[in-house]
Amino acid sequence: MRFEDALQVREFRFEKGLRNFAGWWYFATTDSHVGFESWLERDHLMLMDFDPEVTAVASQPFWLRWRDGDDKSRRHVPDYFARRRDGSAVVVDVRPDDRIPPRDAETFAVTAAACELAGWGYRRSGDLDPVLAANVRWLSRYRHRRFGVPEVAAALLEAFAGGRSLFEGAEAAGDRLRTLPVLFHLMWQRRLAADLSVPLGPATAVWPGGTR
């Protein structure tokens, strides 16, 4: 069983009144649902779904157990295991940059060392740029394949072949209300690209991207 295909090793808690909000993200890359336990985890999961180099992700993938310097038993479940297109893997822990006490920093260091022994990468992912997160969150609404209408997609790719503003290209491909959802789907797929470090808007420059 490959880790990206395994079930989570512990259950999520969904009780009312919890500090964090847990849920399931529709992971379009694999047409499956992947769990998260906070909004920040959800946003990092969203970005992995948006990343064309990530082919699969599993949440809560395994227990890591060890004994600390005081010979006390410790354990940790990383947040995600991601498989990359080249076959490599990376284990991800998500934690805000200002919420890492010494004990947790030690946990992350041990996890990084264990991943290195296994031949995996490791990263602790923290706060996100709010503009990038908002832009990708908007595009994620159109991530489902039902938005990939072939004839509209073809017209949009032709309209943006030389680069145009978002609304201009959408209108050149047909009725804007019909073409915009497909345009955002193509941007989610990276077949069309834009600068996501600034807010998306009608005048955003859009140009051909890669393939996915």
Image: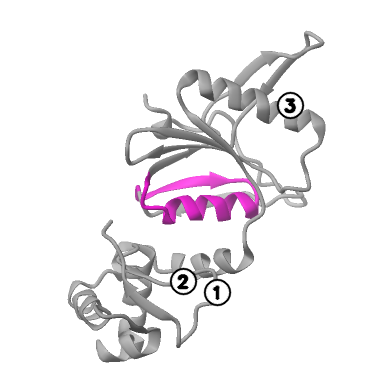
Amino acid identity at mark 2: Asp
Q: Which mark is residue 198?
A: 1
Return the mark for residue 195: 2
Query: Which of the 4 image quarters holds residue 3?
Result: top left
Q: Which residues are magenta?
A: 30-54
- Taking depth in this image into account, of 206 and 49 the one nearest to the observer is 206
Give the percent coordinates (x, y) of residue 114.
57, 20
Q: Earlier in the sequence, mark 3 or mark 2?
A: 3
Query: Where is mark 3, residue-wise?
Result: 106
Compared with 1, 209 (above or below) is: below
Q: Quadrant of the C terminus?
A: bottom left
- Amino acid type indicated by mark 3: Glu
Identity of the residue drawn at 38% across and 33% down = 88
Q: Which label belongs to residue 12?
A: none
Distance in Å between CA atoms under marks 3 and 1: 36 Å
- Picture coordinates of residue 202, whole percent (x, y): 45, 87
Q: Please check the rendered image and state whether residue 98 is part of the magenta-colored stretch, yes or no.
A: no
Query: Is 12 situated left or right of 144 in this image?
Result: right
For marks 3 and 1 on the same chain, the one whose residue lies earlier in the sequence: 3
Q: Can you give x and y, in whole percent of width and height, for residue 198 in the image?
A: 55, 74
Location of residue 79 by image quarter: top right
